[in-house]
Image (tube, helix red, strand yellow):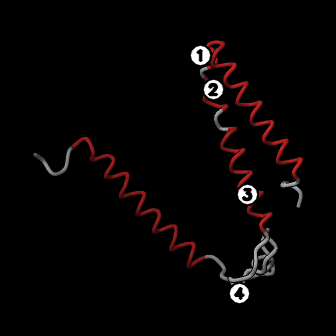
Amino acid sequence: MALFHVEYFSVFIFLLISIGLSFIIFFLSFFLAAQIGGTEKLSAYECGFEPFEDARNTFDVRFYIVAILFIIFDLEVTFLFPWAIVLSTIGSFGFWIMIDFLIELTVGFVYVWKKGALDL
């Protein structure tokens, strides 16, 4: 049994080239880029905290709620792409299952909206 198969030689070459290019690009950007902290780098993040403060500050939970809701609804919408591709082959049962899913998604969105979780 050979230790290195000929079929994987091109994958090995690709891996070596990608690792080499990664190191070259990383070190070139480190040495050639300006390492000056401007006002934009030192300004407050989207969450409202200064970047270089005490890490034990209280954090507004609304930022987490909006982020989690975005991830939930974004991931649920990604189910639409495979459904749209196979829509002609799944028939009316698959169509109505997805309509039910979209109705539940809409009801959940309206509920979150009415509860004020999206208000900042």
Determine the CA span between mark 4 and mark 1: 55 Å
Q: Are marks 2 and 3 in contact (CB under 8 Å)?
A: no
Identify residue for label 1.
90
Residue 83: numbered disc: 2
Instruction: Using the image, determine if residue 58 lies above or below residue 79.
Output: below
Residue drawn at point x = 77 percent, y = 66 percent: 61
Determine the CA span between mark 4 and mark 3: 22 Å
Identify residue for label 4.
54
Quarter occupied by residue 50? bottom right
Q: Secondary structure at mark 4?
A: loop
Q: Residues within 10 Å of mark 4 (few under 14, many from 20)?
A: few
Provide residue 70's location: percent of width, then percent of height: 74, 51
Residue drawn at point x = 79 percent, y = 68 percent: 46
Q: Are marks 2 and 1 in contact (CB under 8 Å)?
A: yes
Residue 59 vs residue 24, the one in the foreground: 59
Residue 83 vs residue 57, the one in the foreground: 57
Q: Between disc 2 and disc 1, whose residue precedes? A: 2
Left or right placement of residue 25 versus residue 39 in this view = left
Name the amino acid, label 2. Answer: Trp
Determine the CA span between mark 2 and mark 3: 26 Å
Provide residue 110's location: percent of width, then percent of height: 85, 41
Residue 74 vs residue 23, the one in the foreground: 74
Q: Secondary structure at mark 1?
A: helix
Residue drawn at point x = 72 percent, y = 26 percent: 100
Provide residue 93's location: percent of width, then percent of height: 64, 15
Residue 31: numbered disc: none
Q: Secondary structure at mark 2?
A: helix
Identify residue for label 3.
67
Name the amino acid, label 3. Answer: Ala
Left or right placement of residue 10 versus residue 64 in this view = left
Name the amino acid, label 1. Answer: Ile
Q: Between disc 1 and disc 3, whose residue precedes? A: 3
